[in-house]
Protein backbone atom coordinates (compact mmCIF):
# COMPACT_ATOMS: atom_id res chain seq x y z
CA UNK A 1 0.00 0.00 0.00
CA UNK A 2 1.37 3.46 -0.81
CA UNK A 3 2.42 5.55 2.15
CA UNK A 4 -0.11 8.17 3.08
CA UNK A 5 2.74 10.62 3.70
CA UNK A 6 5.52 11.46 1.23
CA UNK A 7 8.95 10.23 2.24
CA UNK A 8 11.85 12.66 2.60
CA UNK A 9 13.16 11.39 -0.71
CA UNK A 10 9.80 12.03 -2.38
CA UNK A 11 9.73 15.56 -1.00
CA UNK A 12 13.26 16.28 -2.23
CA UNK A 13 12.44 14.87 -5.68
CA UNK A 14 9.31 17.02 -5.78
CA UNK A 15 11.23 20.19 -5.02
CA UNK A 16 13.96 19.33 -7.51
CA UNK A 17 11.51 18.53 -10.31
CA UNK A 18 9.63 21.77 -9.85
CA UNK A 19 12.83 23.76 -9.70
CA UNK A 20 14.07 22.18 -12.94
CA UNK A 21 10.70 22.87 -14.57
CA UNK A 22 10.83 26.53 -13.63
CA UNK A 23 14.40 26.91 -14.92
CA UNK A 24 13.97 25.00 -18.17
CA UNK A 25 13.71 26.99 -21.39
CA UNK A 26 10.19 26.96 -22.74
CA UNK A 27 8.69 25.93 -19.40
CA UNK A 28 6.56 29.06 -19.12
CA UNK A 29 2.79 28.74 -19.14
CA UNK A 30 2.54 30.68 -22.43
CA UNK A 31 4.63 28.01 -24.20
CA UNK A 32 2.81 24.95 -22.89
CA UNK A 33 -0.42 23.55 -24.24
CA UNK A 34 -3.29 23.13 -21.76
CA UNK A 35 -3.52 19.68 -20.21
CA UNK A 36 -6.71 17.65 -20.63
CA UNK A 37 -7.70 15.56 -17.60
CA UNK A 38 -10.07 12.80 -18.70
CA UNK A 39 -12.58 11.44 -16.18
CA UNK A 40 -14.63 8.33 -16.89
CA UNK A 41 -17.61 9.53 -14.85
CA UNK A 42 -20.30 12.17 -15.29
CA UNK A 43 -19.83 15.67 -13.84
CA UNK A 44 -20.78 16.29 -10.23
CA UNK A 45 -19.88 12.98 -8.58
CA UNK A 46 -17.04 12.25 -6.19
CA UNK A 47 -14.62 11.19 -8.94
CA UNK A 48 -15.27 14.37 -10.90
CA UNK A 49 -14.93 16.58 -7.82
CA UNK A 50 -11.60 14.99 -6.88
CA UNK A 51 -10.23 15.56 -10.39
CA UNK A 52 -11.35 19.19 -10.56
CA UNK A 53 -10.06 19.95 -7.06
CA UNK A 54 -6.61 18.50 -7.75
CA UNK A 55 -6.43 19.84 -11.31
CA UNK A 56 -7.05 23.38 -10.12
CA UNK A 57 -4.23 23.19 -7.60
CA UNK A 58 -1.83 21.39 -9.95
CA UNK A 59 -2.47 23.96 -12.65
CA UNK A 60 -1.38 26.75 -10.32
CA UNK A 61 1.83 24.91 -9.49
CA UNK A 62 2.62 24.05 -13.10
CA UNK A 63 1.62 27.45 -14.43
CA UNK A 64 -0.49 25.55 -16.92
CA UNK A 65 -4.23 25.23 -17.53
CA UNK A 66 -5.76 21.82 -16.81
CA UNK A 67 -9.20 21.24 -18.33
CA UNK A 68 -11.31 18.37 -16.95
CA UNK A 69 -13.19 16.45 -19.67
CA UNK A 70 -15.85 13.88 -18.78
CA UNK A 71 -16.13 10.73 -20.90
CA UNK A 72 -18.44 8.44 -18.91
CA UNK A 73 -19.50 4.94 -19.83
CA UNK A 74 -18.39 1.32 -20.15
CA UNK A 75 -16.89 1.11 -16.66
CA UNK A 76 -14.36 3.87 -17.46
CA UNK A 77 -13.14 2.02 -20.57
CA UNK A 78 -14.17 4.86 -22.91
CA UNK A 79 -11.98 7.33 -21.00
CA UNK A 80 -9.07 4.88 -20.74
CA UNK A 81 -9.22 4.07 -24.45
CA UNK A 82 -9.25 7.79 -25.30
CA UNK A 83 -6.00 8.37 -23.42
CA UNK A 84 -4.31 5.07 -24.29
CA UNK A 85 -5.07 5.30 -28.01
CA UNK A 86 -4.71 9.04 -28.62
CA UNK A 87 -2.48 10.11 -31.52
CA UNK A 88 -1.49 13.21 -29.51
CA UNK A 89 -1.11 11.84 -25.98
CA UNK A 90 1.40 14.34 -24.60
CA UNK A 91 -1.19 16.61 -22.98
CA UNK A 92 -3.60 13.96 -21.66
CA UNK A 93 -4.14 12.90 -18.06
CA UNK A 94 -6.51 10.17 -16.88
CA UNK A 95 -8.19 9.32 -13.61
CA UNK A 96 -6.85 5.77 -13.55
CA UNK A 97 -9.04 4.04 -11.02
CA UNK A 98 -9.89 0.71 -9.44
CA UNK A 99 -11.83 -0.31 -12.55
CA UNK A 100 -9.29 0.60 -15.23
CA UNK A 101 -6.19 -0.57 -13.38
CA UNK A 102 -7.42 -3.50 -11.28
CA UNK A 103 -10.73 -5.09 -12.24
CA UNK A 104 -11.51 -4.40 -15.91
CA UNK A 105 -8.67 -6.63 -17.18
CA UNK A 106 -10.46 -9.51 -15.45
CA UNK A 107 -14.06 -8.47 -16.14
CA UNK A 108 -13.69 -7.94 -19.90
CA UNK A 109 -12.29 -10.54 -22.30
CA UNK A 110 -11.39 -7.89 -24.86
CA UNK A 111 -10.13 -4.41 -24.03
CA UNK A 112 -8.85 -1.91 -26.60
CA UNK A 113 -5.98 -0.98 -24.30
CA UNK A 114 -3.41 -2.81 -22.17
CA UNK A 115 -2.97 -1.28 -18.73
CA UNK A 116 0.67 -2.39 -18.50
CA UNK A 117 1.75 -1.33 -21.99
CA UNK A 118 -0.45 1.65 -22.84
CA UNK A 119 -0.77 3.54 -19.54
CA UNK A 120 1.81 4.84 -17.08
CA UNK A 121 1.37 5.91 -13.46
CA UNK A 122 1.96 9.44 -12.18
CA UNK A 123 0.85 8.89 -8.59
CA UNK A 124 -2.08 7.90 -6.42
CA UNK A 125 -4.86 10.39 -5.82
CA UNK A 126 -7.33 9.19 -3.20
CA UNK A 127 -9.03 6.26 -1.55
CA UNK A 128 -12.77 6.38 -0.86
CA UNK A 129 -13.60 4.34 2.26
CA UNK A 130 -16.47 1.91 1.75
CA UNK A 131 -19.21 1.96 4.38
CA UNK A 132 -21.66 -0.87 5.03
CA UNK A 133 -25.10 0.69 5.32
CA UNK A 134 -28.57 -0.67 5.94
CA UNK A 135 -32.08 0.68 5.68
CA UNK A 136 -33.15 2.56 8.81
CA UNK A 137 -36.13 0.19 8.79
CA UNK A 138 -33.84 -2.78 9.46
CA UNK A 139 -33.67 -3.94 13.13
CA UNK A 140 -29.85 -3.91 13.26
CA UNK A 141 -27.35 -1.34 14.55
CA UNK A 142 -23.99 -3.09 14.20
CA UNK A 143 -22.31 -5.78 12.13
CA UNK A 144 -22.91 -8.62 14.59
CA UNK A 145 -26.63 -7.85 14.64
CA UNK A 146 -26.65 -7.69 10.85
CA UNK A 147 -25.03 -11.13 10.52
CA UNK A 148 -27.51 -12.63 12.99
CA UNK A 149 -30.45 -11.03 11.18
CA UNK A 150 -29.20 -12.17 7.75
CA UNK A 151 -28.72 -15.75 8.93
CA UNK A 152 -32.31 -15.76 10.18
CA UNK A 153 -33.74 -14.93 6.74
CA UNK A 154 -34.92 -18.20 5.11
CA UNK A 155 -34.44 -16.93 1.56
CA UNK A 156 -31.22 -15.09 2.24
CA UNK A 157 -30.58 -11.38 1.81
CA UNK A 158 -30.46 -9.12 -1.25
CA UNK A 159 -27.83 -6.41 -1.52
CA UNK A 160 -27.66 -3.43 -3.86
CA UNK A 161 -24.80 -1.91 -5.83
CA UNK A 162 -24.35 0.77 -8.51
CA UNK A 163 -23.57 -2.01 -10.99
CA UNK A 164 -21.80 -5.33 -11.50
CA UNK A 165 -18.05 -5.17 -11.02
CA UNK A 166 -18.07 -1.91 -9.05
CA UNK A 167 -16.08 -1.67 -5.80
CA UNK A 168 -19.41 -1.65 -3.93
CA UNK A 169 -20.44 -4.94 -5.57
CA UNK A 170 -17.12 -6.74 -5.19
CA UNK A 171 -16.66 -5.64 -1.57
CA UNK A 172 -20.03 -7.21 -0.74
CA UNK A 173 -19.09 -10.38 -2.64
CA UNK A 174 -15.94 -10.52 -0.51
CA UNK A 175 -18.06 -10.04 2.60
CA UNK A 176 -20.39 -12.83 1.49
CA UNK A 177 -17.40 -15.08 0.83
CA UNK A 178 -15.82 -14.33 4.20
CA UNK A 179 -19.02 -14.71 6.28
CA UNK A 180 -20.78 -17.51 4.41
CA UNK A 181 -24.00 -15.49 4.31
CA UNK A 182 -26.58 -16.29 1.64
CA UNK A 183 -26.71 -13.05 -0.36
CA UNK A 184 -28.00 -12.11 -3.81
CA UNK A 185 -26.72 -9.17 -5.85
CA UNK A 186 -29.24 -6.60 -7.12
CA UNK A 187 -27.37 -4.29 -9.55
CA UNK A 188 -28.64 -0.78 -10.28
CA UNK A 189 -27.67 1.73 -12.94
CA UNK A 190 -25.80 4.07 -10.66
CA UNK A 191 -25.46 4.76 -6.96
CA UNK A 192 -28.44 7.14 -6.60
CA UNK A 193 -31.23 4.66 -7.45
CA UNK A 194 -29.50 1.99 -5.34
CA UNK A 195 -29.39 4.30 -2.31
CA UNK A 196 -33.01 5.32 -2.86
CA UNK A 197 -34.15 1.70 -2.65
CA UNK A 198 -32.06 1.13 0.50
CA UNK A 199 -33.69 4.19 2.05
CA UNK A 200 -37.12 2.91 1.05
CA UNK A 201 -36.48 -0.56 2.41
CA UNK A 202 -36.86 -2.38 -0.93
CA UNK A 203 -33.30 -3.73 -0.53
CA UNK A 204 -31.79 -4.01 2.95
CA UNK A 205 -28.09 -3.27 2.53
CA UNK A 206 -25.14 -2.22 0.40
CA UNK A 207 -21.66 -0.74 0.54
CA UNK A 208 -21.51 2.97 -0.27
CA UNK A 209 -18.37 5.01 -0.85
CA UNK A 210 -17.81 7.92 1.46
CA UNK A 211 -18.33 10.75 -1.04
CA UNK A 212 -21.63 9.38 -2.31
CA UNK A 213 -23.02 8.07 0.95
CA UNK A 214 -22.13 10.64 3.60
CA UNK A 215 -25.03 13.09 2.99
CA UNK A 216 -27.62 10.35 3.48
CA UNK A 217 -25.78 8.84 6.44
CA UNK A 218 -25.48 12.12 8.30
CA UNK A 219 -29.05 12.96 7.30
CA UNK A 220 -30.37 9.75 8.85
CA UNK A 221 -31.59 8.22 5.58
CA UNK A 222 -29.02 5.41 5.77
CA UNK A 223 -27.70 3.65 8.87
CA UNK A 224 -23.95 3.05 8.81
CA UNK A 225 -22.98 -0.10 10.71
CA UNK A 226 -19.35 -0.66 9.69
CA UNK A 227 -16.43 0.81 7.76
CA UNK A 228 -14.34 -1.41 5.48
CA UNK A 229 -11.00 0.21 6.30
CA UNK A 230 -8.32 -0.40 8.91
CA UNK A 231 -9.16 2.77 10.83
CA UNK A 232 -12.38 4.56 11.66
CA UNK A 233 -13.24 7.54 9.50
CA UNK A 234 -12.65 10.98 10.99
CA UNK A 235 -16.03 12.04 9.60
CA UNK A 236 -17.80 9.00 11.14
CA UNK A 237 -15.84 8.38 14.34
CA UNK A 238 -18.74 6.57 16.01
CA UNK A 239 -18.91 3.84 13.33
CA UNK A 240 -16.50 0.94 14.02
CA UNK A 241 -14.59 -0.91 11.34
CA UNK A 242 -15.45 -4.42 10.24
CA UNK A 243 -12.17 -5.58 11.73
CA UNK A 244 -13.13 -4.10 15.09
CA UNK A 245 -16.36 -6.10 14.86
CA UNK A 246 -14.63 -9.41 14.30
CA UNK A 247 -14.08 -9.67 10.54
CA UNK A 248 -10.30 -9.89 10.45
CA UNK A 249 -8.11 -8.43 7.69
CA UNK A 250 -11.04 -6.98 5.77
CA UNK A 251 -10.25 -3.84 3.79
CA UNK A 252 -11.95 -2.53 0.66
CA UNK A 253 -11.70 0.88 -1.00
CA UNK A 254 -12.73 2.63 -4.14
CA UNK A 255 -9.45 4.24 -5.20
CA UNK A 256 -8.02 6.45 -7.91
CA UNK A 257 -4.66 7.41 -9.31
CA UNK A 258 -3.40 9.73 -12.00
CA UNK A 259 -2.35 7.99 -15.22
CA UNK A 260 -0.94 9.10 -18.58
CA UNK A 261 -0.19 7.56 -21.94
CA UNK A 262 2.85 5.29 -21.64
CA UNK A 263 4.69 7.28 -24.31
CA UNK A 264 5.01 10.33 -22.03
CA UNK A 265 8.70 11.04 -21.27
CA UNK A 266 9.89 10.17 -17.78
CA UNK A 267 10.91 13.77 -17.08
CA UNK A 268 7.37 14.96 -17.79
CA UNK A 269 5.91 12.24 -15.58
CA UNK A 270 8.19 13.41 -12.77
CA UNK A 271 7.15 17.03 -13.33
CA UNK A 272 3.49 16.03 -13.04
CA UNK A 273 4.17 13.89 -9.98
CA UNK A 274 5.90 16.79 -8.25
CA UNK A 275 2.91 19.07 -8.86
CA UNK A 276 0.54 16.31 -7.77
CA UNK A 277 2.31 15.90 -4.42
CA UNK A 278 2.14 19.63 -3.77
CA UNK A 279 -1.57 19.62 -4.61
CA UNK A 280 -2.42 16.68 -2.35
CA UNK A 281 -0.59 18.32 0.55
CA UNK A 282 -2.09 21.78 -0.01
CA UNK A 283 -4.59 23.28 2.43
CA UNK A 284 -7.43 23.80 -0.12
CA UNK A 285 -7.26 20.22 -1.35
CA UNK A 286 -7.07 18.75 2.15
CA UNK A 287 -10.09 20.82 3.21
CA UNK A 288 -12.15 19.70 0.20
CA UNK A 289 -11.23 16.06 0.69
CA UNK A 290 -12.25 16.23 4.33
CA UNK A 291 -15.76 17.29 3.33
CA UNK A 292 -15.90 14.35 0.89
CA UNK A 293 -14.61 11.89 3.49
CA UNK A 294 -11.78 10.73 1.19
CA UNK A 295 -8.17 9.94 2.01
CA UNK A 296 -5.37 11.51 -0.04
CA UNK A 297 -2.58 9.06 -0.87
CA UNK A 298 0.57 10.94 -1.91
CA UNK A 299 3.41 8.92 -3.38
CA UNK A 300 5.60 8.07 -6.33
CA UNK A 301 4.70 6.45 -9.67
CA UNK A 302 6.42 3.29 -8.45
CA UNK A 303 4.22 3.17 -5.35
CA UNK A 304 1.12 3.54 -7.48
CA UNK A 305 2.30 0.72 -9.75
CA UNK A 306 2.88 -1.55 -6.77
CA UNK A 307 -0.52 -0.78 -5.24
CA UNK A 308 -2.38 -1.35 -8.51
CA UNK A 309 -0.56 -4.67 -9.01
CA UNK A 310 -1.59 -5.94 -5.58
CA UNK A 311 -5.19 -4.80 -6.07
CA UNK A 312 -5.36 -6.40 -9.53
CA UNK A 313 -4.25 -9.76 -8.16
CA UNK A 314 -6.54 -9.55 -5.13
CA UNK A 315 -9.75 -8.64 -6.92
CA UNK A 316 -8.90 -10.74 -9.94
CA UNK A 317 -8.95 -13.82 -7.75
CA UNK A 318 -12.36 -12.89 -6.35
CA UNK A 319 -13.74 -12.20 -9.83
CA UNK A 320 -12.59 -15.65 -10.93
CA UNK A 321 -14.03 -17.25 -7.80
CA UNK A 322 -17.51 -15.84 -8.44
CA UNK A 323 -17.33 -16.34 -12.22
CA UNK A 324 -18.10 -12.72 -13.10
CA UNK A 325 -17.68 -11.51 -16.68
CA UNK A 326 -18.88 -8.29 -18.32
CA UNK A 327 -19.00 -7.96 -22.10
Image: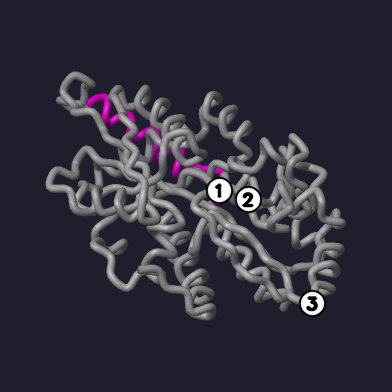
What range of the chain is rendered magenta?
3-23
User: Is label 2 in a helix, a strand or a loop?
Assistant: strand
The mark that comes first in sequence, 1 or 2, is: 1
In this image, 167 relative to 272: left or right?
right
Q: Quadrant of the N terminus?
A: bottom right
Crowdedness near tag 2: few (<14), some (14–19) or many (≥20) residues, C-alpha within 10 Å: many
1 and 2 marks in contact (CB < 8 Å): yes
Q: Give yes or no for residue 201 being in the magenta stretch.
A: no
Image x and y of residue 171, in percent: 60, 63
The mark that comes first in sequence, 3 or 2, is: 3
Question: Residue 239 bears which disc, if any?
Answer: none
User: Residue 101 is drawn in which quadrant?
Assistant: bottom left
The mark lying in front, picked from 1 and 3, is 3
Task: Give the residue at mark 1.
Answer: 191
Task: Give the residue at mark 3.
Answer: 154
Image x and y of residue 86, in percent: 17, 48
Amino acid sequence: MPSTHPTRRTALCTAAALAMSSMSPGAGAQERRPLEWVVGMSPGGGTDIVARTVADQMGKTLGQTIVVVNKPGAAHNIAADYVARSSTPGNLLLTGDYAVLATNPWLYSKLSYNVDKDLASVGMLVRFPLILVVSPKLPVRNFQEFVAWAKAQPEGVNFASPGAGTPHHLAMELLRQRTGLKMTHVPYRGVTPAIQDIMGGQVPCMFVESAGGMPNITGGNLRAIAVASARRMATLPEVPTLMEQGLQDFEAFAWQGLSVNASMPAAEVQRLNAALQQALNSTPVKARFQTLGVEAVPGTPEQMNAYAKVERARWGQLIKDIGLKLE
